[in-house]
Amino acid sequence: MKLMTVESKQIEETGLLKENMHHQSGMKMLFLVFSLLLVPFANSQTVPELSVPVGWGKEFSFSAPVGSGSGSSFAIQGSERITGIRIWENYNSYITGIQLRYGYMWSEMAGYARGNIQEMLLYENEAIVQVAGKYTHYIQSLVFTTNMSRSLSAGQPSGHSFNMYPHTKKAELRFISGRQQYGITSIGAHWGVLADRKNPESPH
């Protein structure tokens, strides 16, 4: 029979407690490692798809924004085809504001209604298929071109050049996003296919 004193019993219990704590700590560490390994797979299942308005197909693409990106973010979008554009510009300077018309309704403005205004209304079955311009801290100039080879330009063409267009010739500009701070500091373009569109040609 094994005799155990009070002191030896306490020592053994302390050793068992330390061993148990060490085991639990190891299990926690192992769980953490597995959790970190599983994060990319979990995220791949939960990342939402880009929202496509009613009437649009799934052949969409995104032209990454250009510009400094200072200020607050904006997004101009609607469920119908873009039928008009308004651009505000400081005289011999940068773009201060942008507004799009969807169907018969004008969107909220991005930026500010300051300076000169340029406007273009689109014809039936006309669509924007190219966005180009120049940028420094602000978007210095913008040129929106349609599938009917018409264009609206505004701003002062100085700085770095950019050229945005969809990945497929059937796609057209669906909405724009970017950032604003006393003017438009960045802009990106989102492209999609309108279901009833008749395969228009783009100039790129």
Image: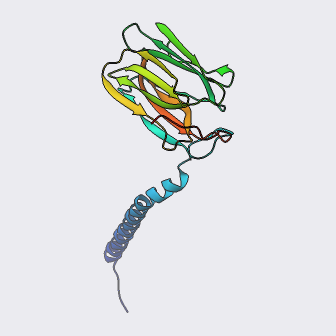
Q: Quadrant of the C terminus?
A: top left
Image spot of residue 77 (x, y percent): 59, 29
On screen, 98 above or below 53?
A: above
Q: How is the image coloured?
A: rainbow
On screen, 163 above or below 30?
A: above
Q: Quadrant of the N terminus?
A: bottom left
In the image, 148: left or right of 64? Answer: right
In the image, 150: left or right of 133? Answer: right
Image spot of residue 106 (x, y percent): 63, 19
Viewer-side residue, 104 vs 30: 104
Viewer-side residue, 164 vs 145: 145
Image spot of residue 90 (x, y percent): 41, 9
Image spot of residue 107 (x, y percent): 61, 21
Name which quarter of the figure residue 197 lies in. Answer: top right
On screen, 98 above or below 115?
A: below
Point 55% across, 28% down: residue: 148
Name which quarter of the figure residue 109 lies in. Answer: top right
Whether residue 113 is visible, yes or no, is no
Give the mark count. Answer: 0
Point 35% across, 23% down: residue: 135
Whether residue 59 is visible, yes or no, is yes
